[in-house]
Image (cartoon, rainbow, N blue to C red):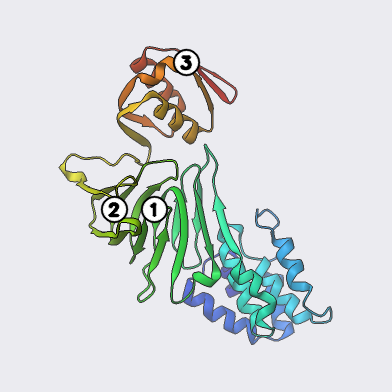
Amino acid sequence: MNDKFRQFHDNELNSEELKAFIEEAKAMTDEELDAGLNSIGDIHDDTDLDIDSIYENILSDINSDNSRRYKKYRVYLGIAAAVIPILVIVSIYFFIQSSNYGIYEDIITKEISISTSNGESANATLPDGSTIKLGPASTICYKLSSFNDTIRSINWEGEGLFQIAKISGNPFIISTEFVEITVLGTTFNLHSRNSSDQVEIYLEKGAIKVSVPTYHKDMEMKPGETAFISKLNGEINVYRNDAGHRYSIGPTDIRFESRRFSDIVNAIELYYGKNVIAAPSLDSELFTGPIPTNDLDKSLRIIEKVFHVKTELRGDSIFIK
């Protein structure tokens, strides 16, 4: 059993094994819980999740002499920070069986949010095992009440690489400001920013359905296709990448087609988290080509060559003149 506690702690259990472990833990004696908890050591304290507030919220409704619930809560705290959403789900499974549902209703309905800022990226693992690589200035939000055994629904803004776990009869739905995507199990890139006038989706494998509720339009995408959806009129244009078209947001670069200099500046600020100061006269210049999103020096060299300017990096600022 100690091996199960260790696997649980290290996030090595799949969804079925996790459910089985929870049932086993509920049936354990106090001595068995003690032995299992001691086998995984102390609680981690290096997570950004506000565990203390959740802890105090739960303990405020638990009698001080109810040591068994406290031991179960220690199991909840012992999970690695990389799988934070599972922390909350496990705590609910452990406590809801022996407590009034209303006590934890605020946890179930509370929104879980993961965000990045300019120049940042992050990897998120959802309770179903799906993974999302968030690009800069991106946000994922969901509630446990809408992410369960019958539906998996999240809200999204930004750009990211999605790898969605396929679960029969349980669709995965992504809602953005403008489109809704229904996923059956697949890998794709999604670029949907509130500041942009279009949504871009590149489907690597699997199948997805894209809906534009405002204009009552929908379509199904095939692997190797890129869809551009206009927020101005709902028009959907689909391109095959093997026909010479390349999606603009790649793994290590972003491509521009006759875009203004200000768009290039915005990309530098977004992907590198720098403040760019440039002469307003440059904004009328147009650019076509790729800009790296993982190599600032190379990006600045391209700008210097194409626009015949000089760049200077000083701290968190880039001067272009």
Residue type for callout 3: Ala
Picture coordinates of residue 137, whole percent (x, y): 51, 43
Mark 3 falls on what kind of element?
loop
Q: Is residue 268 left or right of residue 99?
A: left
Q: Nearer the viewer, residue 291 or 269?
A: 269
Question: Please, is residue 192 above or below residue 35 in the view?
Answer: above
Which residue bears the numbered disc 2?
A: 204
Which residue bears the numbered disc 3?
A: 279
Mark 2 falls on what kind of element?
strand
- Badge 3: residue crowd in 10 Å (few <14, some 14–19, many ≥20): few
User: Outermost residue toward the left?
Assistant: 243
Mark 2 and mark 1 in contact? Answer it, CB < 8 Å.
Answer: no
Residue type for callout 2: Glu
- Numbered label attached to residue 178: 1
Q: Nearer the viewer, residue 214 or 222?
A: 214
Answer with mark 2 or mark 1, whichever residue precedes in sequence: 1
Question: Please, is residue 264 above or below residue 93 in the view?
Answer: above
Answer with mark 2 or mark 3, whichever residue precedes in sequence: 2
Question: Please, is residue 99 above or below residue 154 in the view?
Answer: below
Residue at x 39%, y 53% (from the top left corner): 178
Residue at x 55%, y 41% (from the top left corner): 117
Residue type for callout 1: Phe
Visible residue check, residue 225: yes
Visible residue check, residue 42: no
